[in-house]
């Protein structure tokens, strides 16, 4: 009993001056986070990604209840209207906030859409950053068998998603074109029977594409996604093809594909290697001059095979400096009246400037693996993402969900999927949970595992975090510094949602 009294005595109320009893400052705080954007500006972001840019120190005043309804009327009104504060413990328009939140997480309604079929591991290129290249004629060993294709298609159509995407990857997928034809025709028949939408994509370096292959793609509405790393002196060094120029074949293939399929049926992706870092302007110019409407500036996945190769490794700061120079060039094109986007920026800007989200696997929370994408490997293994199967090539099977012989529920809701799902939402990760950019960013357990040896990850030394945080901050800084840039970014975000 004495101990309790002593304890009660030691708990003191603070003095009266610690409590602001001025009625005009009596507001409730709703959940939001803040981040320093520039030397004199900070951003506050609420649970649905709405933001306000304010002079430094305003965040502290808000949480200390020092914003006065009369004196700071405009700011006070903005804070109420954007759900940062409320005059009632539960804001009267809480349902509006809930609807906005549901809209942001709408991608979860559909479940797995993208099904990647690694149709062959064979390839005639020897790109230095790729671990899957194999030059071999041994089809039995490195092509997906018809039986595995059948099983993959079966599993794909068990997805509740009403629109499925079937993507054929390699190696070089076109080396197994007969198997692609079989898979496409079978999947089309089932999609018709079930009334599901079906998008088909072939990822190819285009080196062995022919008019005949493209005519088939036209007939079956198959999209082409290719690789282009920049001008010839960059592309050919990154993407080596014995006894030929990969660049010349890719450009010829792009032209032919556009001629047969139509201009917008062909897209290209670049990978930034150590060599690419010296050519931000030239790489952007190459995409612009070839008639693309944008470019996706992708850093190399810093793990697996790529890490072993000195031509691929670089620090995140170097990528960020490359990225900013390339983005400046892209903005120049836009200032001159062209519509030309950077697609990583476009994903972030859609999240920052619109009520919508983007179903981009690497920048979702919960993460896009399993509930957005699944990979069926040529040998019948099932992986959570494309990067997961790359880890498996290095004998790391952490993200192997099972095989094509397993039942749907065991793959998608089994022990492994449950284990991953514990840490696939950035809302629950230390560092991310208090980050202002949480709604714009995502969680990537595969990247965390591969780079830090632990799916949960550690944000202060995470290159994923460093890259995303700086790019988001930089985009906001650019918008704040120049109204022309804000207009360009608004246009990019708007077109991404259509
Ligand atoms: S990864 Fe970094 S930038 Fe992204 S939400 Fe987490 S802490 Fe923020």
Image: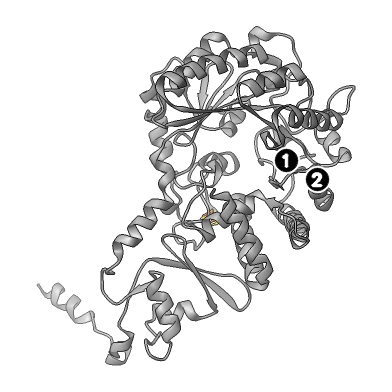
* Residue labelled 2 has its Cβ within 8 Å of some atom of ligand 1: no
**Closer-to-camera residue (453/152):** 152
Say what secondary structure mark 1 lies in: loop
Left of 471 or right of it: where is 360? left
Q: Which residue is mark 2?
A: 276
Q: Position of residue 456 (x, y in %)?
A: 48, 45
How far apart are the two marked residues, 2 and 1, measured between alpha carbons?
8 Å
Q: Residue at x 76, y 21 (%)?
A: 209
Left of 39 or right of it: where is 47? left
* Residue labelled 1 has its Cβ within 8 Å of some atom of ligand 1: no
Which quadrant of the structure image shows residue 249?
A: top right
- Determine if residue 443 is in view: yes
Q: Which residue is mark 1?
A: 271
Question: Are circles 2 and 1 on residues that touch, CB within 8 Å?
Answer: yes
Circle 2 Cα neighbour tier, 10 Å, few/some/many (<14 / 14–19 / ≥20): many
Say what secondary structure mark 2 lies in: helix
Q: Is residue 201 above or below residue 275?
A: above
Left of 95 or right of it: where is 210? right
Which quadrant of the structure image shows residue 448?
A: top right
Q: Residue at x 42, y 53 (%)?
A: 427
Q: Position of residue 16 (x, y in %)?
A: 27, 91
Q: Residue at x 35, y 61 (%)?
A: 97
Q: Position of residue 436 (x, y in %)?
A: 49, 63
Q: Residue at x 76, y 30 (%)?
A: 259
Question: Which of the numbered marks, if any, corresponds to residue 135?
Answer: none
Q: Position of residue 177 (x, y in %)?
A: 67, 15
Q: Earlier in the sequence, mark 2 or mark 1?
A: 1
**Closer-to-camera residue (256/284):** 256
Q: Is residue 475 above or below residue 237?
A: below
Circle 1 Cα neighbour tier, 10 Å, few/some/many (<14 / 14–19 / ≥20): many
């Amino acid at each position: 009993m004495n101990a309790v009294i002593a304890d009660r005595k030691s708990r003191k109320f603070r003095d009266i001056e610690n409590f602001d009893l001025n009625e005009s400052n009596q507001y409730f705080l709703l959940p939001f986070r803040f981040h320093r954007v520039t030397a004199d500006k900070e951003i506050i972001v609420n649970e649905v990604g709405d933001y306000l840019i304010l002079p430094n120190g305003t965040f502290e005043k808000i949480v200390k209840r020092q914003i006065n309804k009369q004196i700071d009327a405009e700011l006070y009104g903005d804070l109420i209207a954007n759900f940062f504060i409320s005059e009632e413990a539960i804001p009267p328009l809480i349902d509006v906030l809930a609807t906005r939140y549901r809209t942001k997480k709408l991608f979860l309604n559909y479940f797995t859409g993208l099904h990647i079929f690694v149709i062959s591991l064979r390839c005639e290129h020897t790109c230095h950053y790729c671990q899957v290249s194999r030059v071999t004629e041994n089809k039995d060993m490195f092509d997906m068998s018809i039986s595995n294709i059948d099983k993959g298609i079966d599993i794909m159509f068990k997805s509740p998603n009403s629109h499925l995407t079937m993507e054929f990857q390699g190696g070089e997928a076109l080396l197994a074109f007969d198997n692609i034809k079989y898979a496409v025709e079978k999947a089309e028949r089932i999609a018709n029977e079930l009334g599901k939408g079906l998008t088909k994509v072939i990822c190819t370096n285009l080196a062995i594409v022919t008019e005949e292959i493209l005519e088939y793609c036209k007939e079956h509405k198959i999209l082409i996604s290719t690789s282009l790393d920049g001008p010839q002196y960059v592309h050919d060094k990154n993407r080596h093809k014995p006894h030929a120029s990969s660049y010349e074949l890719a450009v010829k293939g792009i032209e032919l594909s556009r001629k047969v399929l139509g201009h917008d049926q062909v897209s290209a992706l670049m990978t930034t290697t150590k060599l690419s870092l010296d050519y931000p302007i030239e790489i952007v110019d190459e995409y612009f001059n070839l008639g693309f409407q944008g470019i996706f500036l992708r850093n190399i996945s810093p793990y697996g095979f790529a890490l072993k190769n000195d031509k691929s490794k670089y620090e995140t700061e170097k990528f960020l400096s490359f990225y900013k120079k390339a983005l400046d060039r892209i903005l120049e094109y836009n200032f001159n009246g062209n519509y030309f986007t950077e697609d990583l920026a476009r994903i972030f800007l859609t999240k920052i400037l619109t009520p919508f989200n983007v179903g981009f696997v690497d920048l979702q929370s919960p993460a896009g693996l399993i509930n957005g994408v699944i990979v069926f490997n040529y040998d019948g293994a099932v992986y959570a993402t494309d990067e997961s199967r790359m880890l498996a090539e290095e004998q790391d099977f952490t993200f192997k969900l099972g095989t094509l012989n397993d039942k749907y529920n065991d793959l998608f809701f089994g022990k492994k999927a449950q284990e991953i799902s514990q840490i696939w939402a950035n809302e629950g990760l230390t560092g991310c949970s208090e980050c202002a950019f949480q709604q714009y960013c995502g969680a990537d357990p595969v990247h965390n595992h591969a780079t830090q040896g632990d799916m949960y990850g550690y944000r202060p030394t995470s290159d994923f975090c460093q890259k995303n945080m700086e790019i988001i901050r930089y985009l906001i800084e650019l918008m704040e510094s120049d109204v022309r840039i804000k207009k360009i970014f608004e246009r990019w975000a708007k077109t991404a949602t259509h």
